[in-house]
Image (cartoon, rainbow, N blue to C red):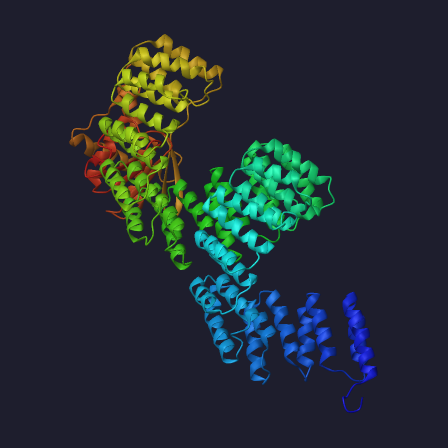
């Protein structure tokens, strides 16, 4: 014993110390450690390992720093502790200090360090470790090479992983699993399956992880038959009793919309766990089988599985889809009692559920009370505000998000850009553009598409086009945004030209693309072109026209007075005409003075119990033009009886980051005197150029031309334009928003104002954008 240095007392103390550590009694263990008259590296390693396993990295580090005689195991244990905490920089710092201290890492140390390499940022360090592996003679170690392959795959360096894989003289199941998983996660699913087949030729037996990985690739390939072949292999190799593999099969069938197969497998599985129930519940929810989803959840509640792992997020999406607020509240109650593992995900689902079920106040309360808010939480709340058209609140919340230091992602930016677009605020859009550039999202296709759409909605087609031209990558969403931008801004020629460019790019147009094309044809009265694109939609691209496409076609035909074709299309289409379609026809009946059809359409509309006053106003005007004042009175009485009110016209203009609102004949603005003076001046200048007020938009029993002309002068959009003219530098573009369609007289007046003031005036009304410049409008007087 003297020669070997063996000490019975030390051996006994280490045994007791090991018992304390295994029992998790680290206080007693540390107390004994301090009282030990002599210790060795084994003693230190035991206690450091105990602290690491308990998650107390600070106590482990303190003990490590106070230890003089460290060996490779001591270093490896602490490195492993930081690796589990994903503190990559500390892992490499310790590894570097270990080598400087003169202690050579063994294969366990290298594998432990590599376990922390799962980010593209550390690729250079992985390469350095690879060099060290070769230098130290570990390149023949299968365990080390497996760790390197896995590390390269997790860092998205498939080329390096593949080269190392090809160079390995000996491979095992773990090697193949790493490559199959790596290829699958990067979307190279066919290659993953190829590696799986090669593995069989190599004579290796697959493990449960192998089957899970290859089934994931079958999902990516959308290959049902291939997945079923894997299922057969699972049965043949007796892995069907493995719950992990069976759950992967459940997931495969669910994601390929084969829930019947999934449920059959679920019912036949000899062993189930909480994941099994979660997968089948989620599968039913994805396929809209909500009744079955809830039935399986009720069964899950009767099991003894951990409630913290229940699929609360999926169940909340079910409540949302069913618009069942009561059900959502019941699930919320269970969430409060349970505190699920994926708490943040569930909280985000709760916010979405309450918003979509019409309880915004509950969503706000949950958001405010949730301390651990991530980007998804903020984005969920911001998008909720946007959905409720609370765009200013959405922008304010985004500002708060930036103040607390939470970084926005592409979904956040899409939501706030939508808010900016809805507000029609070009200044806000430009500020967000700057934020996108600073945040490194300039090349992101989704952020770029949202920015393009925001500029288009703010009436700045120039900025929208520039954004599109500067995008390094474009997808169908990008092209749709650009085509829609041209369509909304009345440039039918550019719309059709962009569609041709889209076809030449190799991308396939979708239903959204054709909706913009037909809208552009509607805005410019392009009947022949509209019929052509409507036909090629189904004939060439095999896309079924939706209700919105038929509405556009009906609008194109009705605007051109082709009412026989309108009635024919309505009779042949697979949808019942809705309020939007019928109101469009009624409006065209007024323009073309088709009273007979107008009254017929109006009767259909009134049967729908309309709450929007637009259709009533059109019918009233139709009767007034024909001099049927009794009918006018009946329409007004019907509006009163049903509680329908005509929406008052309002216009907005942003001046120096402040939004100014105007109503027709509104005299409340602090600068009304200057506004009125400007309007009087413009009226005189317009008269010199031959302008006469068009009072046809007013229908009355008595002649009050003078009063009507003055009233027209103080329409909301003219008040907004006049205020912008006296508040902005000469030559600058004016952007005005209006909630209703611009009247004929204001449209003619604004054309002249643009010429008199030598300004471009952009007006966004309820139907489109009007760009007034040099006495002309982009709509060509067709709107």
User: Is residue 374 something that shows in the picture?
Assistant: no
What residue appears at the point 20 percent right and 32 percent down from the top-left corner? 686
User: Is residue 140 something that shows in the picture?
Assistant: yes
Q: Is residue 545 left or right of residue 772?
A: right
Please determine whether, in this image, residue 147 is positioned above or below residue 648.
below
Residue 640, given in percent of the width and then of the height, sits at 47, 16
Please determine whether, in this image, residue 717 is positioned above or below residue 656.
above
If the image is split into quadrants, where does the N terminus sit?
A: bottom right
Please determine whether, in this image, residue 66 is positioned above or below residue 630.
below
Q: Nearer the viewer, residue 139 or 273?
A: 139
Residue 592, given in percent of the width and then of the height, sits at 26, 17
If the image is split into quadrants, where does the C terminus sit?
A: top left
Q: Which of 417 and 63 is in front in this view?
A: 63
Q: Is residue 41 left or right of residue 87?
A: right
Residue 119, given in percent of the width and then of the height, sits at 50, 64
Q: Which of 94 and 779 is in front in this view?
A: 94
């Amino acid at each position: 014993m003297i020669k070997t240095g063996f000490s019975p007392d030390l051996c006994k103390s280490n045994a007791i110390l090991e018992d304390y550590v295994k029992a998790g009694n680290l206080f007693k263990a540390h107390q004994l450690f301090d009282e030990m008259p002599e210790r060795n590296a084994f003693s230190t390693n035991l206690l450091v390992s105990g602290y690491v396993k308990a998650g107390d990295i600070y106590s482990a580090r303190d003990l490590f720093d106070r230890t003089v005689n460290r060996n490779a195991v001591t270093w490896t244990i602490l490195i492993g502790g930081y690796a589990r905490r994903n503190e990559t920089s500390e892992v490499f710092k310790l590894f570097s200090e270990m080598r400087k201290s003169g202690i050579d890492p063994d294969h366990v140390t290298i594998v432990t360090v590599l376990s922390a390499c799962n980010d593209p940022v550390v690729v250079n360090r992985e390469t350095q470790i690879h060099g060290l592996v070769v230098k130290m003679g570990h390149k023949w170690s299968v365990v080390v090479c497996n760790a390197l392959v896995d590390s390269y795959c997790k860092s998205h360096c498939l080329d390096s992983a593949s080269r190392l894989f090809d160079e390995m003289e000996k491979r095992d199941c773990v090697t193949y699993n790493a490559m199959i998983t790596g290829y699958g996660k990067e979307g190279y699913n066919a290659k993953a399956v190829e590696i799986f087949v090669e593995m069989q030729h190599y004579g290796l037996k697959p493990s449960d992880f192998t089957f899970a990985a290859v089934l994931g690739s079958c999902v990516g390939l959308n290959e049902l038959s291939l997945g079923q072949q894997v299922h057969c292999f699972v049965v043949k190799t007796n892995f069907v009793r493995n719950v992990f593999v069976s759950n992967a099969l459940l997931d495969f069938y669910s994601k390929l919309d084969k829930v019947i197969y999934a449920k059959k497998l679920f019912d036949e599985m000899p062993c189930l766990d909480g994941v099994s129930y979660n997968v089948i519940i989620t599968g039913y929810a994805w396929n809209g089988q909500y009744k079955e989803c809830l039935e399986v959840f009720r069964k899950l509640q009767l099991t003894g599985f951990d409630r913290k792992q229940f699929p609360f997020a999926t169940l909340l999406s079910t409540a949302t889809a069913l618009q069942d607020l009561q059900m959502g509240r019941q699930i919320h109650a269970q969430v409060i009692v349970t505190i699920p593992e994926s708490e943040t995900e569930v909280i985000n689902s709760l916010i979405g559920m309450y918003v979509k079920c019409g309880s915004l106040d509950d969503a706000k309360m949950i958001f405010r009370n949730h301390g651990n808010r991530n980007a998804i939480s903020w984005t969920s709340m911001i998008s909720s505000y946007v959905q409720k058209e609370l765009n200013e609140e959405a922008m304010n919340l985004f500002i708060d998000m930036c103040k607390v230091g939470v970084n926005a992602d592409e979904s956040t930016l899409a939501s706030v850009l939508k808010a900016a677009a809805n507000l029609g605020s070009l200044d806000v859009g430009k500020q967000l553009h700057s934020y996108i550039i600073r945040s490194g999202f300039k090349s992101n296709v989704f952020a770029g598409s949202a920015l393009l759409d925001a500029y288009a909605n703010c009436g700045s087609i120039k900025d929208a086009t520039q954004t599109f031209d500067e995008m390094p990558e474009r997808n169908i969403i990008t092209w749709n945004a650009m085509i829609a931008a041209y369509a909304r801004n009345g440039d039918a020629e550019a719309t059709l030209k962009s569609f041709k460019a889209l076809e030449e790019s190799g991308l396939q147009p979708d239903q959204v693309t054709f909706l913009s094309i037909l809208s552009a044809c509607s805005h410019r009265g392009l009947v022949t072109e509209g019929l052509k694109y409507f036909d090629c939609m189904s004939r060439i691209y095999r896309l079924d026209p939706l209700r919105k496409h038929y509405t556009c076609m009906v609008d194109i035909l009705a605007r051109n007075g082709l009412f026989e074709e309108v009635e024919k299309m309505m009779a042949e289409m697979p949808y019942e005409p809705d309020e939007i379609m019928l109101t469009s026809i009624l409006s065209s009946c007024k323009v073309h003075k088709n009273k007979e059809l107008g009254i017929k359409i109006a009767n259909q509309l009134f049967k729908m119990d309309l709450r929007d006053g637009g259709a009533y106003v059109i019918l009233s005007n139709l009767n007034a033009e024909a001099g049927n004042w009794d009918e006018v009175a009946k329409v007004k009485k019907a509006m009163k009886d049903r509680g329908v009110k005509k929406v008052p016209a309002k216009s907005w203009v942003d001046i120096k980051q402040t939004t100014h609102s105007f109503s027709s004949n509104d005299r409340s603005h602090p600068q009304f005197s200057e506004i009125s003076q400007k309007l009087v001046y413009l009226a005189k200048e317009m008269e010199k150029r031959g302008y006469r007020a068009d009072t046809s938009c007013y229908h009355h029993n008595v002649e009050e031309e003078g009063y009507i002309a003055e009233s027209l002068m103080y329409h909301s959009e003219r008040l907004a334009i006049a205020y912008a003219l006296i508040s902005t530098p000469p030559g600058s573009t004016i952007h005005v928003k209006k909630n209703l369609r611009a009247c004929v007289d204001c449209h003619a007046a604004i054309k002249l104002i643009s010429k008199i003031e030598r300004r471009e005036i952009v007006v966004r009304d309820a139907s489109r954008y009007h760009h007034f410049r040099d006495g002309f409008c982009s709509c060509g007087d067709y709107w």
